Image: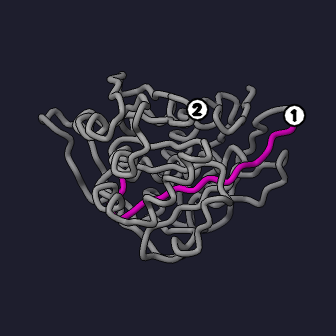
Amino acid sequence: MGQTALDNDTALAASISAFMGFKAICLDLRRFPTEPSVSSLTLLDPFFRLPSVSLFPPLGPVHHFVYNPCGGSMSSKSILMIAGDYAEVLEVMIPFHALQMAGHTIHVVCPGKKAGEFIPTSVHDFEGDQTYTEKRGHNFQLNATFDDIKPEAYDALMIPGGRAPEYLRLNPRVIEIVHHFAKTNKPLAAICHGPQVLAAAGVLKGKKCNAYPATGPEVTLGGGTYVSIPMTDALVDGNLITAPGWPALGAYLAKLLAALGTRIEL
């Protein structure tokens, strides 16, 4: 268990560092103990004076790494993510931690569930078959209650991919929330199968949109213009930010941060 927790901590720290481009982060792995009481990995942000955000439940003494994202003032934003059962694990967990790392607040909700409850996630991979493979992922603990959400309190909306968008788009309240962000021209970010929800909400008319290629016909049927881009890129059209899948998380998050007015200097 100890070595597994260490591997998970190290892998997530490396993923966030790579995706966000923080070359200046120093993580001294020699400080991690190898016995079972391995630490959690915690983010400290002295510049914003935010409380520490634990990436994993505490498993022993806590070690830290520190970063300073920029040298001037920046407004912290509130982001809403609508996820669901069997959402893609990377498209939920990496934005959740990375956006907090940049000083923002992010609430992840699921229809019919409350803060503290869990959603199961799915792992989609590309292993040489004609389509992606699907496996069970981690449980993810929601930190807000869907029924309590007031969309006007948020600066941006995110919709991850995976299996969840198939049924989330059937929920009238989800559609209402999407309409709020479209009408107010706030950043609206959807990745992989997430644009299925946007198409169902009818907010793609006249917009250029990317998505997982197999869902491209739904973008077109929803009145949008499907734009094919490399799997590692993201597309911006006004307030709309879209990407084909988790390999594009670096570009996707960078474009969302830009839309939020977040500036990160190395």
Residue 30: x and y in percent read 62, 44
Residue 120: x and y in percent read 36, 66
Residue 211: x and y in percent read 34, 36
Dot 2 alpha-carbon crowd within 10 angstroms: few under 14, some 14 to 19, many 20 or more = some
**Residue under the point 73% across and 59% down:** 52
Q: 11 or 242, which is in the foreground? A: 242
Q: Mark 2 sits on what residue?
A: 254
**Residue under the point 78% across and 49% down:** 45
From the viewer's perspective, tell me whether residue 265 is left or right of residue 106. right
Compared to 238, does 199 lie above or below?
below
Q: Secondary structure at mark 2?
A: helix
Q: Residue furthest left?
A: 130
Mark sitting earlier along the chain (2/1): 1
As for residue 79 lying within the magenta part, the answer is: yes
Q: Mark 1 sits on what residue?
A: 72
Residue 248: x and y in percent read 43, 32
Q: Secondary structure at mark 1?
A: loop
**Which segment did they paint magenta?**
72-87
From the viewer's perspective, tell me whether residue 119 is left or right of residue 162. right
Compared to 158, does 119 lie above or below?
below
Q: CA distance from mark 2 to mark 1?
A: 19 Å
Dot 1 alpha-carbon crowd within 10 angstroms: few under 14, some 14 to 19, many 20 or more = few
From the viewer's perspective, tell me whether residue 131 is left or right of residue 123. left
Q: 141 or 57, which is in the foreground? A: 141
Q: Amino acid at mark 2?
A: Ala
As for residue 198 lying within the magenta part, the answer is: no
Q: Amino acid at mark 1?
A: Gly
**Residue under the point 58% across and 32% down:** 254
- Total marks shown come to 2
